Image (spheres, rainbow, N blue to C red):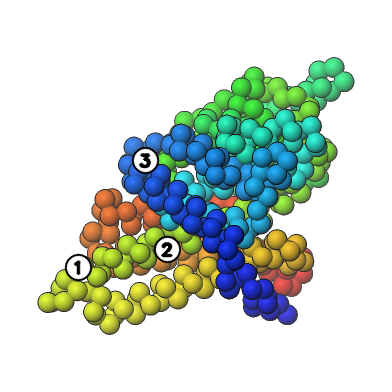
Amino acid sequence: MDAAIDATAGQFELNEDQLAIREMAGSFAAEKVAPFALEWDKAKHFPEDVIRETGQLGFGGLYVKEDVGGSALTRLDAVLVFEQLAHACPGFSSFISIHNMAASMIDRFGNEEQRQRLLPKLTSMEWLASYCLTEPGSGSDAAALKTKAVRSGGNGSDFVVNGTKQFISGAGDSDVYVAMVRTGADGPKGISTLVIPKDAPGLSFGANEHKMGWHMQSTRQVIFDDCKVPAENLLSNEGAGFGIAMAGLDGGRLNIAACSVGGAQSALDKALAYTAERKAFGQTIDRFQALQFRLADMETELQASRLFLYAAASKLDRKAHDASKWSAMAKRFVTDTGFDIANDALQLLGGYGYLHDYGIEKLVRDLRVHQILEGTNEIMRVIIARHLIGK
């Protein structure tokens, strides 16, 4: 039976380096992101200049090796960064997470030529990256993807890609697309991974989707119409793509959970500030026991989520045998809880919580999608159950 929390001091008390990382990310978020988040949301503006600035802090390759400009941090270090950025704006933080997931796939599975050619521009944020797995007809059933890549050219020097990817964050704005494509038979063993540049012939993008949240980042279809991609952009070997995709998702699930913790903390902070000022029946409303109980529950659930997340990140860092299960459990629990905390905060603000200018309704909208992406929370339950009772 798993211990609830491993006896690892770092899960209970951050060391000096981790505190410095958290402070650096928090200071950047407070200065460069938080003051503009509502404006970006309202205008549906993608703050490309501010996103690229994060490269100067090492946020473009948080767990990429140092020889190509990465920061070589642990997964626990990285979730501290995403948590702080999400306190200012979950949509902003989630895009940085997606970029890092794509960059780390190239770092882990690319050959040396690919790493040296692609990663310095990604870790510096000169290039932005998107991850392309989901399709219109295959979401949770990722192994059923239909986007097809066929060898062409002399000695198979190119791939010609046809198909469509759906719900791709940063589509049209990113410079590089790490795409899962079918190069073989049906099923997971026929999937490969291509790194596709934005200027590849035959690559285009659909209209920006009208979404409930995450308004500051684009979400479009990525369309391949006889799209020509050099075979030198194939990661690992043909047929390795499904394993690459699944390996990236463990970390991506922790990252999006970290974004939920940061957003939930922001919602609780706003609720505490409001209830300390709002008066009813002759006193501030934080004097009423019913509201105190609600705040106490929100704090308890938030801290439980944070500890759960840090424990799961530590498991992934140590390559524990049950790291995938813990990543799924943390993603399910933390994203559900984070949304509930933001929703409770909205209720505490009453009618003001429903207004855009107070920032709570944006957090509710932004955090809702975390229960869907990187594998829906229903799929997280499937993964957890398989680990418990066998596949």
Q: Badge 3: how crowded within 10 Å, few (<14), some, or many (20+)?
A: some
Residue 67: x and y, percent?
A: 73, 41
Q: Which residue is mark 2?
A: 265
Report the residue at 49% width, 72% height from top. 303
* Between 347 and 383, the one nearer to me in the picture: 347
Q: Is residue 134 above or below residue 163?
A: below
Question: Label 2 sits on what residue type?
Answer: Gln
| Image quarter (top left, top right, bottom left or bottom right) of the C terminus | bottom right
Question: Label 3 sits on what residue type?
Answer: Trp
Question: Label 1 sits on what residue type?
Answer: Arg
Mark 2 or mark 1: whose residue is earlier in sequence: 2
Q: Is residue 13 above or below residue 106?
A: below
Q: Which mark is residue 278?
A: 1
Mark 2 or mark 3: whose residue is earlier in sequence: 3
Residue 92: x and y, percent?
A: 46, 46
Q: CA distance from mark 3 to mark 1?
A: 28 Å
On the picture, is 113 further left or further right than 162?
Answer: right
On the picture, is 303 further left or further right than 247?
Answer: left
Mark 3 or mark 1: whose residue is earlier in sequence: 3
Q: CA distance from mark 2 to mark 3?
A: 20 Å
